[in-house]
Amino acid sequence: MTSVGIHPALQRNNVTVTGDAAGPTIVFAHGFGCSQLSWRHVAPAFEADHRVVLFDHVGAGESDLTAYDRGKYDSLHGYASDVLDILDALDATDVIFVGHSVSAMIGVLAANRRPDLFSHLVLVGPSPRYVDEGEYRGGFSKADIDGLLDALDANYLGWSTQMAPVIMGNPERPDLGEDLTQSFCRTDPTIARHFAHVTFLSDNRRDLAGVSVPTHVIQCTEDVIAPDQVGAYVHGAIAGSTLTTIPTRGHIPLLSGPDILIEAIRRGLQ
């Protein structure tokens, strides 16, 4: 894997490009508390026939922390702007965007602004709204989210140690929970706390109706962050989308079931 460090956007987001330079571009975008390393068991499977693009959101991985602007990143639109900057810097078109967790909505926002750049969206464990509201069920009450954010603000590292195994959802495989804990702990705590507030308090339900790019939704089983009804909601709100439920427990199939996720991504692109 070689680092691309010419354009400022590519340096800012620690963009790496591998695979077939002549193939279609596929971009893998990581979720909260993770980095591009979270795709290490998935992305290589696409290198033989795609140009594979990985990056770190600002504040994660090896991104440029000096590029963090609290005003810009006070909504997911700032992260969507970064995605578009990366695609423009790479002269990418007909892009397959695979977004995990919060990056699913970041991809939606980017595709709604520049649908001409995208050929497919693959949304893994997406949630447009985590908080229950009216008849909508996002999986958490407002009190749940307030408590989660208060705990995270008070002791980010302690919160990471406690919550990572719950989010991973595979108690019989404690190594997976430890892997996610270490990923959380490598994220800048100040930026992570802000990103958590932006993520868990966002509401992108109205944005789903504007998606014109072919979309495939991948839902995990026993996902405490984005439960079944949320995946079904996203599928129903995006016209013409398809939905696959994969037999991987928890919210991080990139680590708990990469082979199953690879198959589901390929199936969604057919």
Image: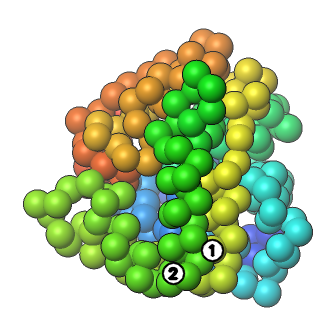
Task: In the displayed orientation, state which residue is furthest to the top.
Answer: 240
Q: Amino acid at mark 1?
A: Arg
Q: Residue furthest left?
A: 172
Q: Amino acid at mark 2?
A: Tyr
Residue furthest front in the image: 143
Residue at (39, 30) in percent of width and height: 228
Is residue 113 or residue 159 the one in the foreground?
Answer: 159
Tell me what residue is drawn at x 71 percent, y 37 percent. 204
Per the image, the residue denoted by label 1 is: 193
Q: Which type of secondary structure does the marked residue at label 1 adopt? A: helix
Image vertical order of residue 129 relative to residue 67, above or below:
above
Q: Which quadrant would residue 43 be assigned to in this image?
A: bottom left
Q: Is residue 204 above or below residue 170?
A: above
Q: Residues within 10 Å of mark 1 (few under 14, many from 20)?
A: many
How far across and down, in percent of the image, does residue 45 sit? 36, 50
Q: Nearer the viewer, residue 102 or 153?
A: 153
Write down the residue under mark 2. Answer: 156
Whether residue 52 can be seen here: no
Q: Is residue 168 left or right of residue 3?
A: left
Q: Quadrant of residue 134?
A: top right
Residue 44: mark: none
Residue sitting at x 76%, y 28%? 206
Q: Nearer the viewer, residue 98 or 191?
A: 191
Distance, label 2 to label 1, CA atoms, is 7 Å
Q: Indicate the secondary structure of the residue bearing disc 2.
A: helix
- Depicted 154 relative to depicted 206: above or below: below
